[in-house]
Image (cartoon, grey):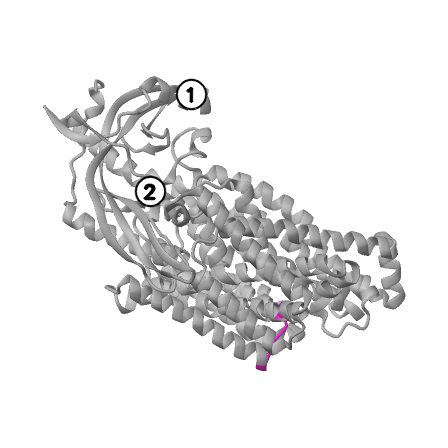
């Protein structure tokens, strides 16, 4: 069974990922197990406000993790295209879009107030919204009969250990 | 207008141009600014951290102590030279791992979540705000003195302008790429200070010549026990002087927060190397200039003006004005990060957490800015009517923050048995002891430095309070990971991307439930 989703096309292959990991850790054997797709909402806002030297009129974007609701600022809009994926490779969303919008606005607001030198909060308006799926490789590593698992971002190669056994 | 004032204004304009250039180069959106130096390597991170945390004290407080006490001042420098290394080595990796597991954004929130105690958050926030204010007041006084020298205005007027500029810069600085401007200023300060030291040594016949001439004035300046051997045999004072900067950084919220935001533990190692190199180059030089001033400026009225006066002595005109402008700008930058931290603690850790959980972002910004404005008003009043020395104010504020937070932060990552009551007692015992020891001048009677007394009481508080508290149930599960890293080879552990923590947890659960890993085809 498949489902149509928005995702990224240009991903590292399983060979590339294992080669990359092998470069960092020569004594381990890496075996790719599967590619799974993790859901995020992409929200883009227009920011308008006054500053000491003129006006602020910029775009700002974030992703909201559709499972845990945690926000993250992003540098550029993700390049997405439609794809048909096996249902069992796609994680189910647990947060509806309406709730994600509330989280997104709060997250962007906090990020601005926390980190920007501003006298007053600028106004923010939602201009784009979409649900997309980011691919992660699940890779099994083996070193001296000890087994470990990693999730590897298939777009960037960044990784994190996972407690899956 | 005085030429030096024009140079200062040109310097500030130059910083604005540099800041704007790097920001525009980095990105056309605000995201890069908000992501705050995520892509910067350990070198720039370490040098920025060092240069922005040392300005007021290193340029005024440290040399003043050396000018007044001679070689005794080096006890503080020894501690400072190793401070960043101790801080990063002891807390760096473990705290990064722990904060990742706790999902804490601020250093106070970290303590609350680690020990499951809102009381820790309240007490920690109050101590932080009051003594971060004290720390920033020292920068205000230093800015007044630097501007007084640069512009020729009276101290009060220079102070008002200085504080006004700092506050405006903090609340409306917009997209200034602070990291890069700090980096450039750091380089100018090192070149300037080392330049003055070289000229001084040439003039005085090297270190031997300097010592001979100091000995001719008063040989007790060369003693490690202070002028007139004031601290002879007082190991409790000397140990406190060494410890305050060698371990004190582990108790400063605006320094500790950097462990929490490091990209990976690999960054910690690189930052240690760069910070160590920078410290050896920079930390001792301002003290050496204080020694030189004993010979070169015997009539100096204000000991805190050693570096500005020597700068004009050896590099009259433009060079001295540029150096002083760099000092002033660095003071602005240091004050800015401390004020922002204090404002954030008040708005996030107190107001949003305990007073109004549904506060709007606008309200949060207003609370934070009001806090900064209050710091400015109180700071001006203190600095005009009862100005303490930069040295004593920094040592006091630094000491209380260190005594309140070193033990909590260290036990948070080294002891799984530490709990809420123990940590609360450690914070209160440590901080209060330092306040009383300093205010009642108990050092003279006990020969024990306030910082050492506070540290002992903080450890005692931990031991006394801990039997009455309860440790979080989950700590046993995560502690081995915090101690040793993930159950992956060490070469991979260093490069783990911490921001994928949540995804890793959710994917782990998903894979366990679905066993999708058995089917490998896409």
Q: In the rendered structure, does residue B453 fall within the stretch colored magenta?
A: no
Considering the numbered disc 2 on the image, is that residue within a helix, a strand or a loop?
Answer: loop
Place of residue B299 in the rendered image (x, y in percent of width and height, measured from the top left): 81, 73
Place of residue A100 in the rendered image (x, y in percent of width and height, measured from the top left): 19, 48
Q: In the rendered structure, does residue B389 fall within the stretch colored magenta?
A: yes
Q: Is residue B76 visible?
A: no
Which of these two is toward me, B48 or B440?
B48
Residue occupying image coordinates x 54% and y 66%: B135
For label 1, count other residues whose C-alpha is less than 10 Å away and answer few (under 14), some (14-19) or many (20+).
Answer: some
First to last magenta residue range: B385-392
- Residue denoted by label 2: A74
Disc on res. A22: 1
Vertically, is B279 above or below B324? above
Residue occupying image coordinates x 73% and y 51%: B194
CA distance separating discs 1 and 2: 29 Å
Vertically, is B498 above or below B258? above
Vertically, is B421 above or below B93? below
Of all chains, the one bearing label 2 is A
**Left/right of residue B77 with respect to residue B120 in the rendered view:** right
Give the quadrant of residue B62.
bottom right
**Viewport quadrant of the N terminus of chain B:** bottom right
Place of residue A2 in the rendered image (x, y in percent of width and height, measured from the top left): 12, 25
Of all chains, the one bearing label 1 is A
């Amino acid at each position: 069974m498949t489902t149509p989703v928005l995702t990224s096309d240009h991903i590292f292959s399983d060979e590339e990922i294992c080669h990359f990991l092998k470069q960092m850790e020569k004594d381990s054997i890496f075996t790719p197990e599967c590619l799974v797709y993790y859901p995020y909402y992409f929200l883009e806002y227009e920011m308008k406000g006054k500053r000491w030297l003129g006006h602020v009129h910029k775009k700002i974007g974030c992703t909201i993790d559709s499972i845990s609701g945690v926000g993250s600022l992003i540098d550029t809009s993700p390049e997405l295209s439609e794809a048909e994926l096996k249902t069992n490779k796609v994680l189910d969303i647990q947060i509806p879009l309406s709730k994600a919008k509330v989280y997104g606005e709060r997250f962007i607001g906090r990020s601005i107030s926390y980190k920007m030198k501003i006298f007053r909060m600028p106004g923010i308006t939602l201009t784009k919204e979409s649900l997309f799926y980011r691919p992660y490789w699940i890779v099994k590593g083996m070193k001296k009969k000890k087994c470990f698992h990693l999730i590897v971002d298939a777009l960037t190669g960044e990784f994190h250990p996972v407690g899956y056994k | 207008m005085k030429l030096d004032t024009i140079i200062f204004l040109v310097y500030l304009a130059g910083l604005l141009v540099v800041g704007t250039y790097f920001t525009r180069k980095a990105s056309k959106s605000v995201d890069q600014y908000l992501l705050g130096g995520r892509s910067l390597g350990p070198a720039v991170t370490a040098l920025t951290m060092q240069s922005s945390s040392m300005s007021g004290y290193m340029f005024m407080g440290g040399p003043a102590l050396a000018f007044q006490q001679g070689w005794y001042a080096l006890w503080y420098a020894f501690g400072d030279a190793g401070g960043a290394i101790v801080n990063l080595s002891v807390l760096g990796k473990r705290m990064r791992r722990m904060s990742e597991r706790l999902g804490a954004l601020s250093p106070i929130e970290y303590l609350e979540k680690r020990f499951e105690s809102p009381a820790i958050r309240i007490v920690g926030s109050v101590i932080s705000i009051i003594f971060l204010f004290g720390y920033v007041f020292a920068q205000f006084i230093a800015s007044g003195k630097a501007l007084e020298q640069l512009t020729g205005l009276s101290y009060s007027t220079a102070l008002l302008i200085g504080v006004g500029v700092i506050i405006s810069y903090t609340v409306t600085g917009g997209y200034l790429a602070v990291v890069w401007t700090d980096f450039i200023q750091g380089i100018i300060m090192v070149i300037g200070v080392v330049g003055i030291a070289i000229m001084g040594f040439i003039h005085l016949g090297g270190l031997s010549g300097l010592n001979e001439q100091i000995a001719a004035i008063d040989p007790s300046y060369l003693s490690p026990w202070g002028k007139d051997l004031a601290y002879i045999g007082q190991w409790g004072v000397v140990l406190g002087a060494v410890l305050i900067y060698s371990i004190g950084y582990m108790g400063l919220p605006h320094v500790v927060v950097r462990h929490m935001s490091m990209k990976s533990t690999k960054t910690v190692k690189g930052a240690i190397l760069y910070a160590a190199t920078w410290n050896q180059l920079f930390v001792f030089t301002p003290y050496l200039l204080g020694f030189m001033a004993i010979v070169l400026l015997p009539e100096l009225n204000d000991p805190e003006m050693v570096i500005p006066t020597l700068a004009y002595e050896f590099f009259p005109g433009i060079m001295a004005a540029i150096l002083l402008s760099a000092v002033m700008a660095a003071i602005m930058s240091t004050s800015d990060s401390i004020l922002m931290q204090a404002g954030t603690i008040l708005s996030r850790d107190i107001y949003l957490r305990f007073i109004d959980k549904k506060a709007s972002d606008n309200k949060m910004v207003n609370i934070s800015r009001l806090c900064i404005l209050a710091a400015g008003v109180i700071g001006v009043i203190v600095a005009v009517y009862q100005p303490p020395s930069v040295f004593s104010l920094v040592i006091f504020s630094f000491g209380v923050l260190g005594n309140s937070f070193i033990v909590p932060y260290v036990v948070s990552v080294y002891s799984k048995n530490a709990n809420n009551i123990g940590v609360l007692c450690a914070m209160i015992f440590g901080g209060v002891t330092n306040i009383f020891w300093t205010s009642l001048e108990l050092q003279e009677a006990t020969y024990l430095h306030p910082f050492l007394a506070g540290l002992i009481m903080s450890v005692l508080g931990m031991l006394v309070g801990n039997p009455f508290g309860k440790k979080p149930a989950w700590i046993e599960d995560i502690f081995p990971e915090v101690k040793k890293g993930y159950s992956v080879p060490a070469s991979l552990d260093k490069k783990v991307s911490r921001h994928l923590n949540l995804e890793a947890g959710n994917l782990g659960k998903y894979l366990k439930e679905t066993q999708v890993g058995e089917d490998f085809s896409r």
